[in-house]
Image (cartoon, helix red, strand yellow):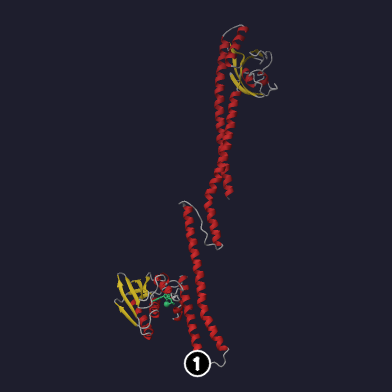
Amino acid sequence: MRTKILIAFLLVIGASFYLVAASTIRMVGDSLFEDTVRAQMTHVEQLAVTLAEQEMPADAFYQRLLEAARQSGGRLLVVDTDGKVTFDTFDERCGTRLALSEVYAVLDGEKDADYGFHQQDGEGRRQAASVLDRLSGRDLNQIWVGCFCAALWRGGQRTGALVLVTSVQDTVDSLTSMRDQMLGVFLLALAVVLVLAGFISRIVTRPVRELSDGIERMSKGDYQHRVHVPGKGEMAQLAAAFNQMSEQVHNLDEARNQFVSNASHELKTPLATIKILVESMMYQDDMDPQLRREFLGDIDKEIDRLSSVVGDLLTLVHIDSHKLRLRREMMLFADTVRESAARLAPLAKKRGQTLTTEIADSCEMFADPGKLAQVCYNIIENAIKYTPDGGTITVTLHRMGRDAVLEISDTGVGIPAEDLPHVFDRFYRVDKARSRDTGGTGLGLSIVQQIVRLHAGSVTVSSEPGKGTTFTVQLPVK
Ligand SMILES: Nc1ncnc2c1ncn2[C@@H]1O[C@H](COP(=O)(O)OP(=O)(O)O)[C@@H](O)[C@H]1O
Ligand SMILES: [Mg+2]
């Protein structure tokens, strides 16, 4: 495709160059020859008139001819009405016929004056050539000459014709050299255009090649390749957008791999535990019923873990694939908070913790009560889990401007500063062992964050290790 366009482009350039060169040469040539013709014709016609006016003997006439020929730098001949040469300043052709069409045109009365250009071929074959045998004194094979012919009159009758023969080789030479020069310029320009076209097309297509190369690499799974297109043009913008996209794809790819490996690990651990427990029960026929019950209890716990991991995973996958639709309705957020706290109260009580709720506003809003209950439950459950026995958990709800603000503070172990930015990451757990003991999957807070975001709200955390942690959820009211 590109080569076709290039060839067409070159053809157009070449054709226009040729046209310009050809018409320039023609125009210059025309004007050069026109000038010559006009000058010589005027000269020969005037001479014919002057010669015809005066009666003079042949000798004097011949002297006048010689004089005029010397002045004009050419050769003068006089022919009679039959076309026979009667005078020749070169004194060679007297008595012979001058078979030139322009001479016959004048003698026949077709025209009063006429001219023609002839080329001498060096061998004297042509009439024109023989006319000019010694004209220029040059020993060239080919010489262009002009024959300018005017009728001679006497008493209103044609008595013959005067013929001036001069070399026009200089004019032809300068035209030829001009043509050669133009050809040279034309070829040079063509070469320059060719080189430039190649150069420009390379420059123009380089970013495109870079990009298509990048896209190809990306389609083969190389997300780390970046394209380099300097400048600020559209191509550079496109390249920047492409790089941004491949970075995002790269991140997504890594996150997906991480997620899959974490999820598999999370499922593998309880499965391995179940397998060990089941196997030891299989090979111990005379197992103590008390121990057997303990084993079965452990298996039951692991199955609970499995189903909670699977449940959390499903929720996340749902949110990720944008399939999760909020079932919004007019609701009182205060009710949701109160209910969640009430459901967790027995757990707190079991650990001797004080769980208090302070609700300053009912916070009516258009939201999904089930999902918001999940948010409250997860955060309060965390607070209970990560607070030692006898600690205090405080849940407060109030309005601030157009937002409902839910704060859940505890007097627990806290979160180290370096872990704070990651607690919302999937599978992230500060203390792996403790979290597993308490049945955590590490997915709770990431689900919380997703749900809050779906409600156009925000969730933040602040913590002091050893003193306690506060989670703040902000949701727009209506
Ligand atoms: N109130 C809290 N106090 C201390 N650490 C917390 C608290 N809430 C969450 N964390 C930390 O954040 C991690 C992620 O929480 P989460 O996503 O709910 O997972 P988990 O299943 O472990 O509860 C927890 O493992 C824990 O280390
Ligand atoms: Mg949790």
**In the orientation shown, which residue stands out farthest toward the front?**
466
Residue 92 point in image, percent of width and height: 68, 14
**In the orientation shown, which residue stands out farthest toward the top?**
57
Q: Amino acid at mark 1?
A: Gln
Choose top left, top right, bottom left or bottom right for residue 476.
Answer: bottom left
Q: How many marks?
A: 1
Mark 1 Cα-neighbour bin, 10 Å: few <14, some 14–19, many ≥20: few
Q: Where 398 sits versus 345, above or below? A: above
Q: Quadrant of the C terminus?
A: bottom left
Q: Toward the viewer: 45 or 259? A: 259
Q: Can residue 332 be spotted in the picture?
A: no
**Label 1 residue SS:** helix
Ligand 1 quadrant assignment: bottom left
Q: Where 88 sits versus 340, above or below? A: above
Choose top left, top right, bottom left or bottom right for residue 388.
Answer: bottom left
Q: What's the residue at 55%, 21% (across, down)?
A: 38
Q: Is residue 135 left or right of residue 317?
A: right
Residue 120 point in image, percent of width and height: 66, 23
Q: Is residue 343 left or right of residue 8?
A: left
Choose top left, top right, bottom left or bottom right for residue 391.
Answer: bottom left
Q: Toward the viewer: 104 or 468? A: 468
Q: Is residue 464 left or right of residue 191?
A: left
Residue linked to disc 1 = 290
Q: Can residue 417 be spotted in the picture?
A: yes
Residue 224 point in image, percent of width and height: 52, 61
Q: What's the residue at 58%, 37% (across, down)?
A: 187
**In the orientation shown, which residue stands out farthest toward the left?**
360
On whether ligand 1 comes within 8 Å of the CB at mark 1, the answer is no
Q: Toward the viewer: 284 or 177? A: 284
Q: Is residue 304 left or right of residue 97?
A: left
Residue 322 point in image, percent of width and height: 45, 70
